[in-house]
Image (cartoon, rainbow, N blue to C red):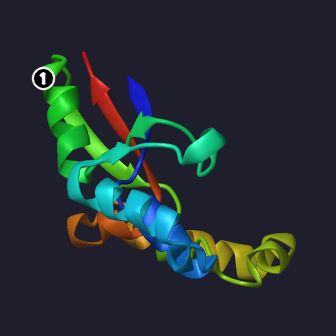
């Protein structure tokens, strides 16, 4: 089984990068996301949707509670998702391979899991 999840830190990370935290409405949404994972869209559906954003440990526990074993949580982007030249690096096989090696080297590192805006839970039933 594989399940994708949005990190409870996604709004905060994106909000810093995009300067959305300057908007007090978005800042309040990001604060709640970090506090309890309850992401609530802004007025008229602004700022994504209504959803639960996971802490990596919560996602692991949900998978275990569902009867899965050998559960692994893997980061998808890591801290490099907002590199200004990411698309240019993607177009260069040597540079892209270096990015992928970096991601792979920390994708399972628990202390850095929250630095990724998305992650995947993988387990067996």
The foreground one among 72 and 49 is 49
Q: Is 122 situated above or below 104? A: above
The foreground one among 51 and 40 is 40
Report whether 36 appears left or right of 26.
left
The foreground one among 15 and 7 is 15
Q: Is 124 situated above or below 82? A: above
Q: For the C terminus, give its image quadrant.
A: top left
- Residue at point 20%, 30% (across, down): 62
**Which image quadrant for residue 96?**
bottom right
SS type, badge 1: helix
- Residue at point 25%, 40% (across, down): 59
Check disc 1 and report the residue beneath it: 65
Residue 87 coordinates in the image, percent (x, y):
81, 72
The foreground one among 91 and 24 is 24
- Residue at point 43%, 43% (across, down): 40
Q: Is residue 57 visible?
A: yes
- Residue at point 12%, 23% (across, down): 65
Residue 118 coordinates in the image, percent (x, y):
47, 52
Report whether 73 appears left or right of 3.
left
């Amino acid at each position: 089984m594989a399940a994708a999840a949005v990190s409870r830190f996604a709004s905060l990370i994106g909000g810093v990068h995009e300067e959305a935290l300057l908007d007090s409405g978005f800042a309040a949404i990001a604060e709640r996301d970090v506090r309890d994972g309850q992401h609530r869209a802004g007025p008229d559906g602004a700022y994504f949707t209504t959803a639960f954003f996971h802490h990596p440990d919560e996602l692991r526990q949900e998978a275990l509670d569902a009867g899965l074993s050998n559960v692994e949580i893997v980061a998808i982007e890591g801290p490099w998702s907002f590199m200004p030249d990411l698309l240019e690096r993607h177009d260069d096989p040597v540079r892209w391979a270096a990015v992928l090696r970096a991601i792979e080297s920390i994708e399972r590192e628990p202390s850095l899991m929250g630095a990724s805006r998305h992650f995947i839970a993988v387990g067996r039933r």
